Amino acid sequence: KVADLKGMKQGQLRLAVVTTAKYFVPRLLGSFCQKYPGIDISLQVNNHQEITRRIQDNQDDLYILSQPPEDLDLCTEPFLDNPLVVVARHDHPLAKQKNVSIKQLRGEAFIMREPGSGTRQAVQQLLEKHKVKVKVRLELGSNEAIKHAIAGGLGISVLSKHTLVLESLSKELTILDIQHFPIQRRWYVVYLGGKHLSVVAQTFLEYLIEETQPITKLALRA
Ligand code: PGA
């Protein structure tokens, strides 16, 4: 496969991903670019609603998001779990308890992502299903800011577990063991149904699936 030889693939790759994916995609791009130094990349990071709009407008080659919109003609491929967990400061009263009822979250001071966020939507659905009303103290458009707000004692939140990797706050934050959590979600790599993928986009798509496969297998075994 001569065309696969190092440096043979050239061109631009336009990627757009939801905010929870920004914790692993740049790393993956690092190794990808090492393998294919001729490829230039632009990476957009935004919430679910904004990524959906970009898909509709055909702005990028590939997209990564959870829950691909069903009303669009898309090619979708699931590739990695994106569990949402309840995050609190380490000294939270529920931090030492196991298998806590979701009802216990009633009235908790809560930090919520902005409207348009897929994380927010998933959290609201679960809370509504169990008729749990939290006290939203703060709405924030950034996972990073939410973690700092939790550390600052403003409340608890629900975030993708992936937002906690490489966490310098890790001593300050903890995951609460609440029933019905983690909310099990998955990431999909997506492109418009009628779209002819460039060689570069096709190469990245294959690379993404291949590189995340061992992680997926490991998670299934655990
Ligand atoms: P978002 O993305 O909360 O930034 O929209 C998360 C997701 O949909 O998985």
Image (spheres, helix red, strand yellow):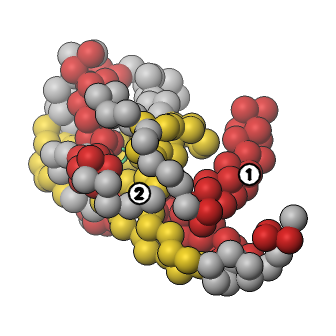
Q: Is residue 79 left or right of residue 142?
A: right
In the image shown, does 27 or 88 lie closer to the viewer? 27
Does mark 1's beta carbon lie closer than 8 Å to ligand 1?
no
Residue 95 pos. (x, y %):
45, 42
**Going by the picture, which residue comes out furthest to the top?**
130
In the image shown, does 104 or 144 lie closer to the viewer? 144
Asked whether residue 156 appears in the rendered view, the answer is: no
Q: Is residue 212 left or right of residue 183?
A: right
Rendered image quadrant of residue 145: bottom left
* Disc 2 residue crowd, few under 14, some 14–19, many 20+, Cα 10 Å: many
Asked whether residue 137 appears in the rendered view, the answer is: yes
Rendered image quadrant of residue 203: bottom right
- Secondary structure under the numbered disc 1 in the rendered image: helix
Residue 106 pos. (x, y %):
21, 27
In primary-sequence order, the first of circles 2 and 1 is 2
* Residue type at numbered disc 1: Glu
Q: Residue at x 47, y 55 (%)?
A: 62
**Label of residue 69 in the image:** none
Residue at which label 1 appears: 210
Residue 88 pos. (x, y %):
37, 49
The C terminus sits in image quarter: top right
Q: Residue at x 30, y 42 (%)?
A: 118
Residue at which label 2 appears: 17
* Disc 1 residue crowd, few under 14, some 14–19, many 20+, Cα 10 Å: few
The N terminus sits in image quarter: bottom right
